[in-house]
Amino acid sequence: MQFRDLQKQYEVLKPKMDAAMAEVAASARFISGPQIKELEDRLAAWVGRKHCVCCANGTDALQLCLMAWGIGPGDAVFVPDFTFFSTGEVVSAVGATPVFYDVSPVTFNADAESLESAVELVKREGKLTPRVVADVDLFGLPADHEAVAAVAKKHGLLFMEDAAQGFGGSLHGKRNGAFGDAATTSFFPAKPLGCYGDGGAVFTDDDAMAALFRSLCVHGKGTFKYDNVRIGMNSRLDTLQAAILQVKMDAFEEYELADVNKAAQWYDEALADLPMIRPTVPEGWYSSWAQYTLRLRSREERDTVQARLKEKGVPTMVYYPKPMHVQKAFEGGERHVPCPVTEELCGTVLSLPMHPYLHRETVDAVAAALREALG
């Protein structure tokens, strides 16, 4: 049993995938081949943005936004406490200060009231300048972007959507990646739309911002490659990954997104009688199900269940075992408001195998093993 079965996906897509990779090899245009622009145009249109700029990975995509906005020392960037490290890491990388706020116990995503408290805290202290709010489409589910946007507007903050796990999800008919002043995603292999290495993208409707992203991606280039007008980075998606993503995007649109939602429904049905909290998708939300994450009743129960499932050959993961504000890397260089929901989640969450190629029999087997592990 695979946690996310990329081998099965390749078997299904093999004829088209092999042809796409062979075409790139035959052309020898491994960097900046035509597949890059084709992919960018396709992704922008699908998300509903004017521009998509591909880059080397999802972390770079986040940092590109902060660099383009001139975020640096003395600036505060507000980040959910329950998320992957990179959302806060890039803030410190540009010299700014991450300020962590709590998440909703229902969706695990940004809690607008906690965000408001964090902004007010920074304003009262007067040591940092509030500049940017980031929210995260965790586990495939859109954050409450409308509530976050209202806080950002009230306080004059830039708004960055981190859709690394959420590509394919939507809120009231608007797809993840279409929110905020800019949005980012990741094409890490295990993401809802993943390549065969690292990759990422930035989305915006601003022409000047898109041009700046393209410059920053290639060493701060000006009119041509060797005209360097600003300090940038080396962050390009290679042609091979773009070709792979085109093939995967076909499957993603045609059936994968629907099939992963079907697998989530099977889990909901199979686990309905068990004493745990299953994922919630509010009305008007649509998830791309990067993970199917349960909440157990205690850390001890979570750890015991995980160990028993491992013995039965059922792979699981804990996303995430530590709140961002206790990560040693941020020690002394961050601020946060109380985050009790995050602290509870880190001790109780457990993610089950989840991908578009799951069979009902596998879901039932996982549910049976889970029922036995719970005793």
Image: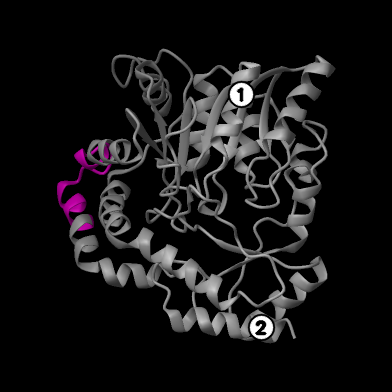
Residue at image position (19%, 67%) is: 15
Residue at image position (71%, 51%) is: 105
* Apparent side of residue 210 relative to residue 87 in the rendered image (left or right): left
Quarter of the image where one finds residue 347: bottom right
Position of the C terminus, as image quadrant, is bottom right
* Apparent side of residue 308 relative to residue 233 in the rendered image (left or right): right
Above or below 42: residue 9: below
Residue span colored magenta: 21-36
Q: Are marks 1 and 2 in contact (CB under 8 Å)?
A: no
Above or below 57: residue 127: above
Residue labelled with disc 2: 371
- The amino acid type found where label 1 is placed reads Ala
- Closer to the camera in the image, 125 or 55: 125
Residue labelled with disc 1: 152
Asked whether residue 184 is in view, the answer is: yes
Question: Residue 267: x and y, percent?
Answer: 53, 72
Above or below 324: residue 122: above
Residue at image position (37%, 58%) is: 257
* Apparent side of residue 19 relative to residue 152 in the rendered image (left or right): left
Dot placed on the residue nearer the N-terminal end, 1 or 2: 1
Question: Residue 348: x and y, percent?
Answer: 74, 63
- Closer to the camera in the image, 97 or 348: 348
Residue at image position (65%, 50%) is: 108
